[in-house]
Amino acid sequence: MSKNGSGYVKPDFIINEDAPRIPDNYELCLAHERGLNFWQEEYRRLMNFDESKVPPYTLPALPDTLTEWKQERIRLKQLFLDCMYGEFPPAPDKIELKLLAERSDALNGIALRREYRVYCNMDNGRSFNFDLLLYLPRDSAEPPPCVVQLNFRGNQAYAPDMDIRPTRAPEGGADSWHKILPSSQPRGLEPGRMSYEMIIKRGYAVATACYGEIFPDNLDGFRKSCFTLFYDDLRPDCEIPLSELLAGRRRNIGGYVAWAWGYCRIADALEKLGVTDNSKLACVGHSRLAVASLLAGVYDERFKMVCCNNSGSGGAQLNRRKFGSMLQVLRVCRSNWVCDNMVQYIGREDTMPFDQHQLLALVAPRGLYVASSGKDLNADPYGTFLSVKEASKIWNLYGLKGLECEEMPPENSPVGCMARYHVKTGKHSITPYDWEQYLNFADELFDRKNN
């Protein structure tokens, strides 16, 4: 893929800032997706949910000394990008903020609310922006720690406040699992999913942005994403002719790293604002955004606490177990999330030069919390626990306690120290129970037990 050159033309969605970030060719996206539906059905038939059918496997070993680990972690950070996630975009040359709205009586009177447009600008004239929602405790005597999270349906979707600006991110429809339609601007959805009020009452600020404004989650999302800052040629896979593929063209970017980039830019914005304690930032994500949160924590050490909730394939679960949602479903049916190089490992997970326990270990010595749901077999709760257990060794090399648990814990029984895990009762979700555990961990990590 070509990086930016002299032929740059400012995209329409940047000129018209408030336009919805839907694909220009809706019909092509939908046709491509429908072509994939057959393969998605086939690959789901191949998915294994029987523990007795997990093949024998050997995980790549972690080093035995801290000196060896510090060398290995440099290699692993690049290897994960090269083989799975794609190139991590750099920071923009400048961050600028525009205050769009504010209230002093938000969340039923317990919070200050500010809405910003975050402009990511390059010295060569390129620009990209997304909207940031920030809640601050009204009664905080000093800058509070902050929870950073991306959301799925828009900043307006999950709060009790009904006057938050609408999102520009697209959403899915009855005939599409990718997000290709203008948003219906839902409001008042599942307040426990984001748990803003719980977070504020515990003395934390919360900053969020919609993932679809940073990288629209569809097969043509690249052309209306943060990648426009850095690349000229952002054609979707369905527009690439065979001749270019045969000549060696490979897409080395994907949605996971774009969303992780979004977490990092929120941290930039918080540093510029100076209203939160930016030495105490936690990143939290659920499902595909759990992978993004994990990547943000690995590649940006400003996040001192990293929470990975129900991440599944591509996140915390071990690939070599071939249990639940395997790499073939991720690469073929959600190809916009990962880079092209990952295709070589479909059905050949044992040849991968890494496994996900090594990704988790890259968070050390900072705090890591990984969570599963008991009925979410797609995301392999047991394989996720094993991944945390294997990674725990690296916290020990730093002289810290990691998971400190040998057996899968019962549901609703958190375990661990600097590396933690729980599996809650229920389906694929993030709930107030999860948030309570994350905030308990944050209280310990940030020494807020008496607050």
Image (tube, rainbow, N blue to C red):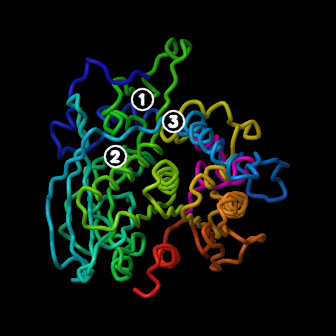
**Residue 189 in the image: x percent, y percent?**
35, 70
Give the spatial CA distance, label 1 vs label 2.
16 Å
* The label number, if any, that marks residue 86 in the structure image: 3
Is 310 included in the stretch rendered in magenta? yes
Please give the range of residues in magenta. Answer: 309-331
Tell me the element at label 2.
helix
Give the spatial CA distance, label 3 vs label 2.
16 Å
**Residue 192 in the image: x percent, y percent?**
41, 75
Question: Is label 3 or label 2 in front?
Answer: 3
Does residue 383 sit above or below 354 in this rendering? below
Does residue 408 sit above or below 32 in this rendering? below
Q: Nearer the viewer, residue 80 or 18?
A: 80
Give the spatial CA distance, label 1 vs label 3.
15 Å
Identify the residue under disc 1.
236
**Residue 178 in the image: x percent, y percent?**
43, 45
Neighbor class of circle 3 (other Cα within 10 Å; few <14, some 14-19, many 20+) is many
Residue 362 visible in the displayed image: yes
Asked where in the image residue 6 lies, by quadrant, the reply is top left
Residue type at the position of mark 3: Gly
